[in-house]
Amino acid sequence: MGDQFDEVEERTVSGKRLGMYVYILPNLMTIANLFCGFYSIVSTFKGEFKTAALMIVIAAVFDLLDGRLARLTRAISKFGAELDSLCDLVSFGVAPAMLMYQWALNPFGRLGFMAAFLFAACGALRLARFNVQVGVVEKNYFQGLPIPMAAGIVASSYLAYDDLKWQASGSIILLCVTMMLAVVMVSNFRYRSFKDLDFKQRLPFRYLIVGLIVIFLVAIRHEVMLFVLFFSYALLGAVFGVLRLGKKQKNIPANAYAPADANEQDLQEETDN
């Protein structure tokens, strides 16, 4: 195995050793995302659940920034897309699963353990499916709940329970929420991505009113209202999917997955997956 590695290292092109060049700024944002996810896991082990929840939220901010910076600076690459998926699995798959298990599901024993694992495993499947469907599925909708949103629901659920002083340990509601989030991540339910909204252009006045209402609701009691908003997004998508409401989704043939000529800009968009 070591000999094979050495052989790869010694490969040259036109007498020069192969080098690798990457875009620094967006990938540093991605690494910051990973750091927050790792910090969240360590905080969970220490019993510092509020810190763990906040680190997941901060990781989501870095996850949003890396894709935006990549598109803004034209620093888009397949390397960045793959790195983003790996970091997302830690920050939005493993970290929230560990938080939910240690905070609320531990009393359920093996059932709680498997529910937390199901969340992490479905998050990994969600990321993998997104990667092979890049450039194929329509951009205005996600297929299944985006993994950062699922992680945000877990983090905000802790903040809401802590603010309301509710008992979380052994909660049947949180057990069901964890399993529901896992299922909707790998479902075919359609979730609006809002990528068709161009905030750089003029929009109807009602959009400003809607934004003002959202800010007002969150500001009233942000610990609780963030959970309500995130969970409503997940729940409405599931209800619409079960009842088959809204625009019908087109069937995608399996051989259309991962087209060879997929646009690299689409690859980087998995920061929103």
Image (cartoon, rainbow, N blue to C red):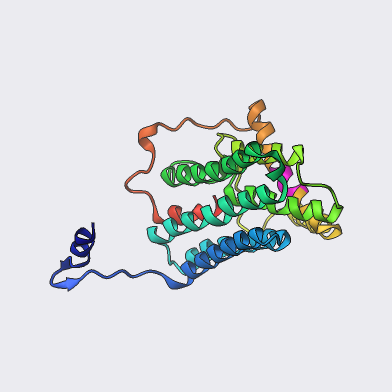
Q: Please tell me in which quadrant of the rendered image residue 180 appears.
A: top right
Question: Where 243 falls versus 263 (above or below)?
Answer: above
In the displayed orientation, state which residue is furthest to the left: 15
Residue 125 visible in rendering: yes
Q: Residue at x 54, y 68 (%)?
A: 32
Residue in the foreground of this view, choosing between 65 and 107: 107
Counting from the top left corner in percent of width and height, residue 122 is at: 54, 41
Say whether residue 27 is left or right of residue 108: left
Counting from the top left corner in percent of width and height, residue 256 is at: 37, 37
Residue in the foreground of this view, choosing between 65 and 49: 49
Q: Is residue 230 magenta?
A: yes
Q: Is residue 66 magenta?
A: no
Q: Residue at x 48, y 72 (%)?
A: 25
Residue in the foreground of this view, choosing between 213 and 81: 81
The quadrant of the picture occupied by the N terminus is bottom left
Say whether residue 144 is left or right of residue 262: right
Magenta-drawn stretch, dominant element (helix, strand or loop): helix
Counting from the top left corner in percent of width and height, residue 3 is at: 19, 61
Residue 201 visible in rendering: no
Say whether residue 89 is left or right of residue 162: left
For the record, the magenta segment spans 228-233
Question: Where 81 falls versus 115 (above or below)?
Answer: below
Counting from the top left corner in percent of width and height, residue 127 is at: 49, 47
Disc tally is 0
In the displayed orientation, state which residue is furthest to the top: 243
Q: Residue at x 73, y 61 (%)?
A: 50
Residue in the foreground of this view, choosing between 51 and 11: 51
Say whether residue 145 is left or right of residue 79: right
Q: Residue at x 47, y 54 (%)?
A: 85
